[in-house]
Image (tube, rainbow, N blue to C red):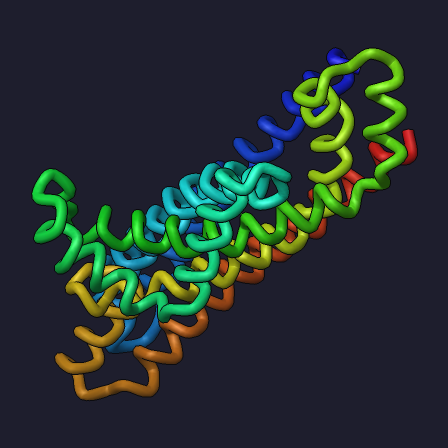
Amino acid sequence: MKRVFASRSAQGLLFLVGSFLGFVLLSFVVGKLLVFMPEPIGSRSDLFVQGAKVTLLITLYAAVLGLAIGMLLGLARGSPRRWLSAPAFAYIWLIRGTPVLVQILFVFYALPILVPQLQFDEFWAAAVALGLNVGAYNAEVIRAGIQAVPLGQSEAARSLGLSNIKTLRWVVLPQAIRIVVPPLVNNVVALLKDSSLASAIGLLELTLAGNRISSETFLPVPVLSTVALLYLIYTSAITVVTSLLERTMRLKAHV
């Protein structure tokens, strides 16, 4: 069982690395194509590429942070121990009940006042705020995925002498992962679009880059249409990767 889990983990890691390299290649191709677009896009393609790079990096860092937070909170949320489940519930309730924009502004402007040691620049303030936000949504997805695994699986594992931690690690989580992958990736797609709110703190991501070019050229229609097209390309790429991952995991489940 451990060998199978390790093998699948290695395959999953290779899939993630391949997906990341695919996005790097996609960004390179998109950057080259923007050069050949008519004005005011072609001559300012570097600014679009720079904004898209920042957007993808924010999404990547926030997604990793959100996955770690979501895993911890999801496990705590489903725990029978109140001292674990109650704080997790309070965090999820607070984050999901407040706007993402307010959270970004809070991390950038208010958090350094409350905790002087935590001072972030625009990039890391946006990445941390978005990671904290998506972590709350990931927590509910992971909790639901764990609860969707039939109770008999856990009971059978314990009857074979596995401890609660080993049952969770080797029996429950591998099955829950197949359930939670689609909604988790949907959260990443939403995260990519929410990263546009980082423009509120002056971060030069894709949306702010488009706004600056639009203000400079007084041509909002082609500029903002290009920005929307770039978001559409990247979200579509994530959807394609998700479909491939789901198909791969479905095939492995029948092996």
Q: Position of residue 255 (x, y in %)?
A: 91, 29
Q: Position of residue 115 (x, y in %)?
A: 13, 45
| Picture residue at 38% right of the left edge, 49% below the top | 131
Q: Position of residue 35 (x, y in %)?
A: 31, 62
Q: Residue furthest front?
A: 82
| Front residue (pair 26, 118) | 118
Q: Quadrant of residue 40?
A: bottom left
Q: Does the image show residue 67?
A: yes
Q: In screen coordinates, is 59 left or right of 167?
A: left
Name the quarter where the N terminus is drawn.
top right
Relative to 30, say whether 160 is above or below: above
| Picture residue at 8% right of the left edge, 53% below the top | 113
Q: Position of residue 189 (x, y in %)?
A: 52, 59
Relative to 169, say whether 79 is above or below: below
Q: In screen coordinates, is 86 left or right of 111?
A: right
Q: Does the image show residue 43?
A: no
Q: In screen coordinates, is 6 left or right of 237?
A: right
| Picture residue at 39% right of the left edge, 65% below the top | 194
